[in-house]
């Protein structure tokens, strides 16, 4: 009965205001996040897979930073202190690289 009362509302939402698929980089990042969660949960100190996943994050440095922070929270949840320290170093490197690029925009 709602759609018959105001057909414009349903037509607008169907026509494209709400995309039915996420943009490709977002899909990739969601998949990376899910894989990160699985990798961090596994016991062991093989972090190379985790860092490879983080390298594949699509988007600006802010998105990469959010993903590293997410990995740190997951690592804390599973008490992976060694992994957290490695992730902190990666985050510091990302932030310093980002600051260098802001200071010298012609370096690209």
Image: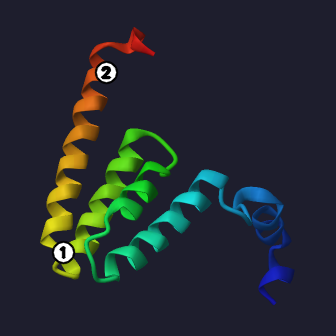
For the residue pair 16 and 91, the one nearer the viewer reads as: 91
Q: Would you name the residue on which mark 1 appears?
A: 80
What residue lies at 82% left-to-right and 81% top-to-bottom? 3
Residue 21, position as x, y percentages in the image? 72, 63
For residue 95, which quarter of the picture? top left
For the residue pair 98 and 16, the one nearer the viewer reads as: 98
**Can you say whether 9 is above or below 108 in the image?**
below
For residue 9, which quarter of the picture? bottom right
Residue 8, position as x, y percentages in the image? 82, 66
Instruction: Residue at the far top: name it.
Output: 106
Sequence order check, earlier mark of 1 and 2 = 1
Instruction: Residue at the far bottom: name it.
Output: 1
What residue lies at 32% left-to-right and 49% top-to-bottom? 65
| Within-10-Å neighbours for mark 1: few <14, some 14–19, many 20+ | some
User: Which is more foreground, mark 1 or mark 2?
Assistant: 1
- From the viewer's perspective, tell me whether residue 24 is left or right of residue 90: right
Residue 2, position as x, y percentages in the image? 77, 85
Residue 47, position as x, y percentages in the image? 31, 64
- From the viewer's perspective, tell me whether residue 42 is left or right of residue 12: left
**Can you say whether 24 is above or below 2 in the image?**
above
| Within-10-Å neighbours for mark 2: few <14, some 14–19, many 20+ | few
Q: Would you name the residue on which mark 2 appears?
A: 102
């Amino acid at each position: 009965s709602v759609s018959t009362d105001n057909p414009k509302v349903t037509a607008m939402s169907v026509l494209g205001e709400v995309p039915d698929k996420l943009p490709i980089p977002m899909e990739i990042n969601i998949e990376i996040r899910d894989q990160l969660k699985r990798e961090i949960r596994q016991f062991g100190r093989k972090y190379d897979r985790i860092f490879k996943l983080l390298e594949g994050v699509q988007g600006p440095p802010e998105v990469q930073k959010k993903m590293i922070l997410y990995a740190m929270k997951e690592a804390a949840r599973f008490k992976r202190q060694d992994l957290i320290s490695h992730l902190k170093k990666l985050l510091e490197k990302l932030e310093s690289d980002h600051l260098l690029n802001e200071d010298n925009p012609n370096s690209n």
